[in-house]
Image (cartoon, grey):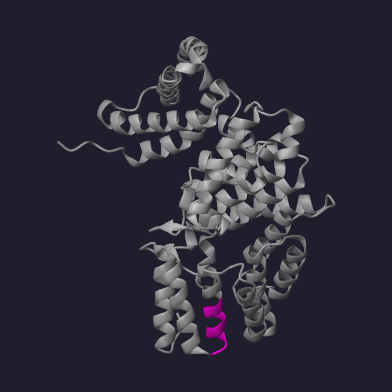
Amino acid sequence: MTQPSLDPASEHLLRDLAPQVLGAVIRRYRDFAASEDAVQEALLAAAQQWPRDGVPDNPRGWLIQVAARRMVDHVRSESARRQREHAAALDFGQVVAAASVESRRDEDETLTLLFMCCHPALTNASAVALTLRAVGGLTTAQIASAFLVPEATMAQRISRAKQTIRASGIPFEPPERRVRAERLDTVLHVLYLIFNEGYTASSGASLQRLDLAAEAIRLTRAVRQLMPDVTEASGLLALMLLTHARRDARTGPAGELVPLPQQDRSRWDRAAIEEGVALLTATLSQGRVGPYQLQAAVAAVHDESPSHDSTDWAQIAALYGLLERMSDNPMVTLNRAIAVAMVQGPAAGLALVDALAAGGRLAGSHRLDAVRGHLLELAGNRDAAVTAYLAAANRTTNTAERNYLLTQAAAVREGGAR
């Protein structure tokens, strides 16, 4: 007999609840690795039992209860920790009794987990990777793609992060206000990467993971509410809103990628654009400008342009120039190359792309080849453009992106770009 499977609504519920449950379990047991394993087992149990028995009235409490049982089993299996076994068994009763109360707490467990993962014993890179796993629900391969490193390297980084936390002796608990401020840069970077994965998925059949992008926006709103005087939190929220506003126009009826020049701008979310522009305007007037605000300014130029042809590319190139001086990110230079090509011609943009390629920092990235293909196409070098598009298609693991790049290569080969 075939095992019934979860319906899409229940799958979405589990994704939403996973970081909340993990935060609650870690807060009680202070063991990230064991808590993560226990929560994964609870999610697996839900996937097996809920289709048969129905979603419980308090699904969050149900998951916490199952995870707590797994933690008790874990403690019992360690003969050297008999005293902890007794304490955990007692605590299990408290967890079950408090589960319904937990679901009504004002504190957002996901937000708490977000700050908890930015642990002082970790480097920024390790904290980001760990949080993307725990809060964003990304796979190791997706995180590796975001960092432009091999999957094996990222797996080792995440494993070392857990070991470092365990060995540090520093309590893994919700930080105080002062500590939150110290960890804010890492938290914002995490949210930025989660949103990017939602905006363009690193792998899979769909171009976008709208649920992941929406969760990043929700968490960024919560961070901004928690720390309203931090302009970069507002800048990041503005960037997300202005970018996410185009989501409906980015894909066609069959889920195919629709590039920016061909998007139906009437399908852009005007309410999100207005909110994003208002946020950006307010933050820019407060003094110091950070990288998220500059990226939001680029997005605002695009969103406020009535058409692709009327876009102020000179302003975009200037903004990317400022951003390039502020951050050591090769993707910024790649984006600036596109804007420069629109202002000074494709040869100028290709020069920047070639310099990036020579530096090797984007080696193996499909985006470098995709931009090169686009600029070569604009320059009229059809054969080289086809080669670049095909190279990009071979390197991307996102089906929608691959199909678009193959379509572009075919169109250029036939003499008429789409």
Residue 379 lies within the magenta run: yes
Residue 369 lies within the magenta run: no
Rendered view: 242 above or below 386: above
Q: Residue at x 54, y 58 (%)?
A: 149
The N terminus - image quarter? top left
Give how far across and how far down residue 135 sits, in percent: 53, 39
213 left or right of 40 in image: right
218 left or right of 41 in image: right
Give the residues in magenta.
372-380
The quarter holding residue 162 reads top right
| Residue most extreme to the left | 1
The quarter holding residue 284 reads bottom right
267 left or right of 317 in image: left
Q: Residue at x 51, y 61 (%)?
A: 267
| Residue most extreme to the right | 287
Rendered view: 408 above or below 191: below
Residue 415 appears in the rendering: yes
The mark tally for this picture is 0
Give how far across and how far down residue 110 sits, in percent: 56, 33
Rendered view: 378 above or below 194: below
Magenta stretch: dominant SS?
A: helix
